[in-house]
Image (cartoon, rainbow, N blue to C red):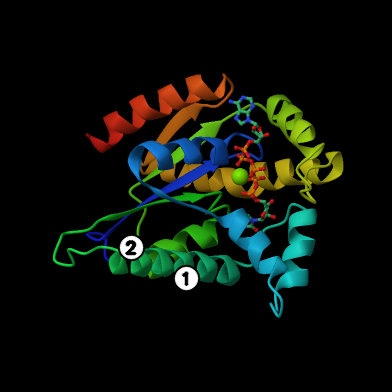
Amino acid sequence: FSASDVTVIFVLGGPGAGKGTQCARLVKDYGFTHLSAGDLLRAEQDRPGSQYGQLIRDCIKNGEIVPMEVTVALLENAMRDTISSKKSSNNNPGSNNNYKFLIDGFPRKMDQALKFEEVVCPAKLVLFYDCPEEEMERRLLERGKTSGRADDNAESIRKRFRTFVETSMPVVNHYEAEKRVVKVDATPSPDRVYADTQAKLKKALGD
Ligand code: UP5
Ligand code: MG
């Protein structure tokens, strides 16, 4: 993908920080395409004939990170599908299109970050939702009453937090050192978090 055709924003934050919630709002107001790595992995896990089903199921349950080849390929395919379906529904093919993607919950490990930016496209910035563990735990246990997610239980949540601190925070710190991180306090209500997101993105993107 060429950076002139595609804008990628990575959306990071601990489990339950509210990444999906905020992405849904950004899609509505700014026409981003939202690709959640976790959602793509769950869909692949359930796809009949997938050779990765069991591997993904085990990783998710244990809060471990699925090998990057699987996730990068799923994201790359989803980006290609989005672009080709938008192209075919666009009756002005000469127009200068820029496709904007929110890549949610990825990259969660340094190797994924480097690989994606090398083979797919560099990210314009990283939107980082910062939230204390007690609050994230409260949200996930509450959601777990109805979500049906195999990892919304106390034991899996503990493992997800650990992976986040040990493996995913270094990714955030890497981008922070490159001054590519927009950090938002994810503790307040969804409305307030969104207002802060809009203000900070506007400033960072200059539009
Ligand atoms: N909620 C949201 N915002 C709130 C607010 N401001 N105040 C109060 N409540 C709020 O929100 C979580 C819950 O909190 C919801 O009930 C919501 O209503 C409420 P949500 O928006 O879903 O938060 P999100 O950050 O998206 O939480 P999620 O559980 O999706 O985060 P994870 O990062 O844990 O999950 P993900 O699906 O990204 O990954 C799952 C697993 O997949 C990983 O653990 C890993 O095993 C695997 N994975 C990989 O291996 N590689 C990848 O690249 C990605 C995932
Ligand atoms: Mg999510």
Mark 1: secondary structure:
helix
The answer to whether residue 156 is above or below residue 76 is above
- The circle on residue 105 is none
The answer to whether residue 80 is above or below residue 16 is below
Q: Quadrant of the C terminus?
A: top left
On the image, the x and y values in percent for residue 88 come to: 30, 69
What is the quadrant of residue 50 in the picture? bottom right
Q: Which residue occupies 34% across, 40% down? A: 30
Q: Circle 2 is placed at which residue position? A: 86
Q: Quadrant of the N terminus?
A: bottom left
Q: Which residue occupies 48% across, 44% down? A: 11
The answer to whether residue 102 is above or below residue 72 is above
How many C-alpha atoms fall within 10 Å of the one at disc 1: few (<14), some, or many (≥20)? Answer: few
Q: Nearer the viewer, residue 82 or 104?
A: 82
Three-letter code, disc 2 = Lys
Three-letter code, disc 1 = Asn
What is the quadrant of residue 180 in the picture? top left
Q: CA distance from mark 1 to mark 2?
A: 14 Å
Q: Nearer the viewer, mark 1 or mark 2?
A: 2
Is 205 placed left or right of 125 in the picture?
left
Q: Nearer the viewer, residue 76 or 29?
A: 29
- The circle on residue 77 is 1
On the image, the x and y values in percent for residue 2 come to: 27, 65
Mark 1 vs mark 2: which is more N-terminal? 1
On the image, the x and y values in percent for residue 174 come to: 46, 46
